[in-house]
Image (cartoon, rainbow, N blue to C red):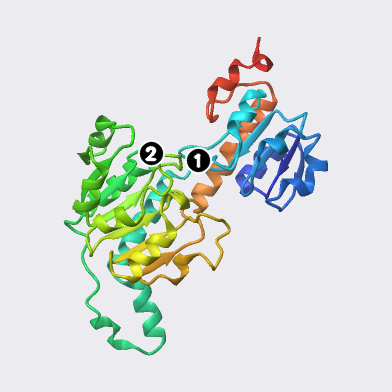
Amino acid sequence: MKFVLTHSLSQAGMDVLHASGAELFVANSAEPATYLDQLKDADGFIIRVGLCPASIIDQCPNLKVIGRTGVGYDNVDVAHATSLGIPVVFTPGANNRSVAEHAVASMFALAKNMKEADEELRQGNWKIRDAKKAFELYGKKVGIIGVGAIGKYVAEICQGVGMKTAGFSHSKNRAKVEAAGCEYYEDMDQLLRDCDIITIHNPLTPETKNMISAPQLAMMKKTALLINTSRGPIVNEQDLADALNNDVIAGAAVDVYSVEPAELSNPVFNAKNLIVTPHSAALTREGTDRMGAWCAEGCVAICNGQRWENVVDKSVYNHEKFAK
């Protein structure tokens, strides 16, 4: 059994792979085309950062499983892999609390004007304390777009500090939103108008691409904050930068970008009142260990002929390769 990894997993993940007795090749590269010679006889391909398109999959005749250390899988051609009977393992739930805590931490940092206060004080500006930008989160309404596994944790933490929580679901799942203790909104536009903070927790789909653009930003309160720890293309980055620089909204925090690794030409880096982090919300010690171990366990199980529950498309098990 041989596994090719774009990059090393956490120690917990590597321990699982070593215990399986598998041969390992760690490429330390997000470009699989540069190590195709290693991939062509691999049983498993585990991706931390990088793309796995159909053109790569087709050149790997021995491939039995593709692993993704996270919940996002838009960088893998899942449909093509599934058509060939190759399950795509992912790790839903491994980093839910990590991402939720990051989103709420971003709310606190923005509400307390911590970034500007830090930068100005280091320049000797003690009077930044009089900027009058800081405010309390208690009693403020946070609108959660996507009240799923992460969104419900965001709601729980926000409720714990006395915030009001509201939710919008693209699937119109009122029961799920209300089960999280959130006021249900049928109309996303109305959520944008009513809330003091908007935080995004839904996947990137054709429906959600550019879901937050200039018209939606204009609906928000001038005092509102926007948090995006989901996927970069969900928010139009130029429109967000323009909205911040023109005081359409008060602040934002983004952890994800339309191109990653993020390029400094991205307009968000020239926006005021914006906190940026390098797609690191999920990368706590605990979350990273869970992602690595769960992904490795799933990939090893499938290579050993087992069916793993956490695969992106379970219809893959209808393929003749899995016929008993």
Q: Nearer the viewer, residue 152 or 194?
A: 194
**Mark sitting on residue 71:** 1
Q: Residue at x 46, y 43 (%)?
A: 204
Q: Residue at x 55, y 39 (%)?
A: 73
The x and y percentages for residue 185 are: 22, 40
The x and y percentages for residue 20 are: 71, 33
Q: Farthest residue in the front direction?
A: 215
Looking at the image, residue 77 sits to the left or right of residue 113; the answer is: right
Work out which quarter of the rendered image holds the C terminus and state it: top right
SS at badge 2: helix
**Mark sitting on residue 149:** 2
Q: Residues within 10 Å of mark 2 (few under 14, many from 20)?
A: some
Looking at the image, residue 268 sits to the left or right of residue 259; the answer is: left
Q: Do residues under tags 2 and 1 come within 8 Å of each other at their CB atoms?
A: yes
Could you tell me the amino acid type at mark 2? Ala
For residue 226, what is the image quadrant? bottom left
Which tag, 2 or 1, sits closer to the chain's start? 1
For residue 45, what is the image quadrant? top right
Q: Residue at x 47, y 69 (%)?
A: 269
The x and y percentages for residue 88 are: 60, 32
Q: Nearer the viewer, residue 110 or 290?
A: 110
Could you tell me the amino acid type at mark 1? Val
Q: Farthest residue in the right direction?
A: 37
SS at badge 1: loop
Q: Farthest residue in the left direction?
A: 139
Label 2, label 1: how far apart the Cα atoms are = 11 Å
Work out which quarter of the rendered image holds the N terminus and state it: top right
Q: Is residue 310 visible?
A: yes
Q: Nearer the viewer, residue 213 or 200?
A: 213
